[in-house]
Image: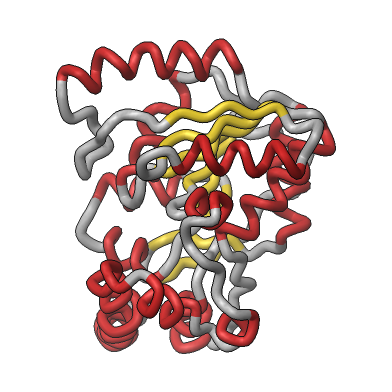
């Protein structure tokens, strides 16, 4: 239960999944409040793919609808909201929110921990952040392998996991950024946040790749017109299935929901 001296967040629902009606400034204010009052918090960034995935994954649905700040990420959710309810959403790209939270942490001399990513992404991203934000206290770790339910895969993972949790607990970060890929990261945060010594956690997907310079940022004009999905398809064609789900399958499911479920 969160301290009630800050105004309660406003939510909408897209196909049964909560999304915040908020701004970057409001998110930062809430995080600052939670940290200063030792109220543990979680942030996820719903997008078309995650909302679609949650229709058939009850663990993911519970994780997303239990989070404190489900910040909408992706123009597809805005179009869905306009189509279903005639109201727009304020879309906040997760990678941009990450940078704003890093700035907040730097200003307040907080500790942050980067967990997950592919190969050494977290370490490289941490190094890049340390160069830019001089008062930021930062640690990073690759993390264990998880299955689709956010559970440890092998005995070796279970053995190394204890050392990882000890490292996080000893560092006691105000914010833990988790990049295990969806839906694993959202489910893992939901299942483990109460067990670790952190102020709060945010699921960040591929953000470390951008910070580390592995993935290229889209041109401003593509971002402006909601074409980031096309940029990712061009630069990372291995994501074709995920982009197909977000760009083609999701609108069809929204249409189906409008016809069959929205009037219930």
Rendered image quadrant of residue 222: bottom right
Q: Which of the two residues, 95 or 120, is positioned nearer the viewer here? A: 120
Q: Residue at x 44, y 84 (%)?
A: 84
Q: Position of residue 213 (x, y in %)?
A: 54, 56
Residue 119: in sight, yes or no? yes
What is the quadrant of the C terminus in the image? bottom left
Residue at x 41% of width, y 43% of height: 117
Asked if residue 212 lies left or right of residue 246, the reply is right
Tell which of 10 and 192 is nearer to you.
Answer: 192
Report the side of 238 relative to 37 (left or right): left
Q: Residue at x 36, y 77 (%)?
A: 233
Q: Please determine whether, in this image, residue 77 is positioned above or below residue 22.
A: below
Q: Is residue 1 visible?
A: no
In percent of width and height, residue 10 lies at 63, 59
- Relative to 98, is 235 above or below? below
Q: Nearer the viewer, residue 204 or 62?
A: 204
Q: Residue furthest left?
A: 154
């Amino acid at each position: 239960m969160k301290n009630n001296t800050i105004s309660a967040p406003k939510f909408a629902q897209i196909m049964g999944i909560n999304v915040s009606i908020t701004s970057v400034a409001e998110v930062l204010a809430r995080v600052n409040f939670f940290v200063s009052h030792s109220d543990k918090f979680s942030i996820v960034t719903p997008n078309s793919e995650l909302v679609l995935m949650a229709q058939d994954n009850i663990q993911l649905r519970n994780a997303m609808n239990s989070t404190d700040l489900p910040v909408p990420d992706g123009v597809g959710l805005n179009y869905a909201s306009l189509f279903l309810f005639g109201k727009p959403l304020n879309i906040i790209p997760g990678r941009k929110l990450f940078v704003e939270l890093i700035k907040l942490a730097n200003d307040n001399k907080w500790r942050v921990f980067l967990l997950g990513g592919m190969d050494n992404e977290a370490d490289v991203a941490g190094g890049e952040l340390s160069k830019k934000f001089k008062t930021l206290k930062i640690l990073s770790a690759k993390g264990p392998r998880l299955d689709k339910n956010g559970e440890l895969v092998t005995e070796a993972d279970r053995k190394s996991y204890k050392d990882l949790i000890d490292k996080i607990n000893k560092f006691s970060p105000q914010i833990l950024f988790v990049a295990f890929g969806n839906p694993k990261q959202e489910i893992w945060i939901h299942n483990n946040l109460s067990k670790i010594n952190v102020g709060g956690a945010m699921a960040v997907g591929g953000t470390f790749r951008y910070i580390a310079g592995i993935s290229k940022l889209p041109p401003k004009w593509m971002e402006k017109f909601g074409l980031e999905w096309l940029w990712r398809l061009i630069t990372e064609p291995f994501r074709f299935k995920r982009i197909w789900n977000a760009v083609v399958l999701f609108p069809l499911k929204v249409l189906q929901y409008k016809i069959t479920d929205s009037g219930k």
